[in-house]
Amino acid sequence: MAQRFSAPSSSMGRGSSSGVPRSLIVFTVLSVLMFVLGIREGDSGILHGVRGVFQTLATPARVVGSVVASPVSGLGNIMGNLTADSETLSDLKSENEQLKSQVARLSEYEEEANTLTDLLQLRNQYNLDSTAARVIARSTDSWSSTITIDKGQSSGIETGMPVTTTTGVIGQVCEAGPTTATVRLITDESSGVSAKVQSSGAQGQLQGSADGSLRLNLIRTDQQVSPGDSVVTSGLGGVYPKGLPIGTVTNVTKSPGSMYYEVVVEPLTSVDSLSEVLVVTSLSSDQQATSDDAASANAQDRTSSTTASTQAATTTDATTDAATDESDATSEE
């Protein structure tokens, strides 16, 4: 039987003899030709115009695709955040707390630096021999008003030294240890400061009280003092440098028959917010009361004594006259 052999099929319709599809070869050749023609014809050629038309037609599709993809992308970010592990969230929380703590410390350092700068300006303004100290404790009982500072005998602090802040005098060292000292505040009931009304020069004694208020005693009713007047140290007694601010007069009253005003003074410094103070370690000659200041104070005392004697004599004469009149009236009866 004769065998029938089928002729091998030709693949020339679908590809070249090397197995590469003819369509790929055709597209490659066309692409090269169009690329070359595009370069040679410039921006005003036909090919560039056709490409511009296709870009214009495709723009709406690109815009729609972008709008559709945006929510999907945002949703992906949200899902990524929601699926962040607890360790990452814990690290972020810890970092946030550290940053808050650093900000608080920086604010405290800035406030301390400003206070120290003000204390330095005060020392230079009044030419004070002094040392700065930090307040480390406050009295908690109701019968004394004191603070404790972090400087003591090892820093040259001694009992009796005056203490001031950037705004005014606050007290005097009443006890000094090796590394700390106790300051009795001017509002303490046992405290006393030689002071004067700055505007008129009327001198008196500033006294603390149990309720924490200040009283300026020994201001005669014939002297000038009004609410709003500034009260400063007089320098008498050699404890406080003269001229340091203390407080402001808030109230002036006169009791019937009294030769002295009742003067209430509000201190310039609130001890509740104290952090840094200045301890005056020594006084120069120009920071102490002069002989004229002492003479003025003595004259004021003599005037007060004369006034008191006159009032007493007047009272005695009035009593004698009254007794005489009463005796005459009895004789006539």
Image (cartoon, rainbow, N blue to C red):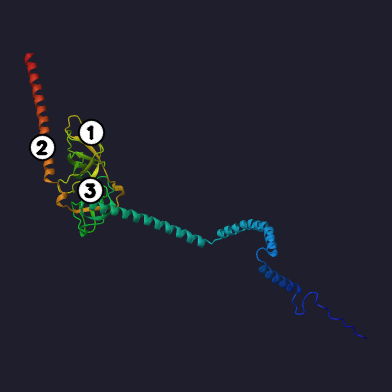
* Outermost residue to the left: 331
Residue 327 image-quadrant placement: top left
Crowding at mark 1 (Cα within 10 Å: few <14, some 14-19, many 20+): few
Q: Which residue is mark 1?
A: 253
Mark number, residue 281: none
Residue 73 at least partly seen = yes
Q: CA distance from mark 1 to mark 3?
A: 26 Å
Q: Earlier in the sequence, mark 1 or mark 2?
A: 1
Indicate whether 154 appears above or below 27.
Answer: above
Q: How far across and how far down the image is residue 183, in percent?
A: 23, 51
Q: Amino acid at mark 3?
A: Gly
Q: CA distance from mark 1 to mark 2?
A: 23 Å
Q: Which residue is mark 3?
A: 171
What's the residue at 10%, 24% (across, down)?
318
Q: Amino acid at mark 2?
A: Arg
User: Looking at the image, which is closer to me, 247 or 20?
Assistant: 20
* Outermost residue to the right: 1
Q: How far across and how far down the image is residue 165, in percent?
A: 26, 50
Q: Classify mark 1: helix, strand or loop.
A: strand
User: Looking at the image, which is closer to me, 16 or 264?
Assistant: 16
Q: How far across and how far down the image is residue 92, in percent?
A: 48, 60
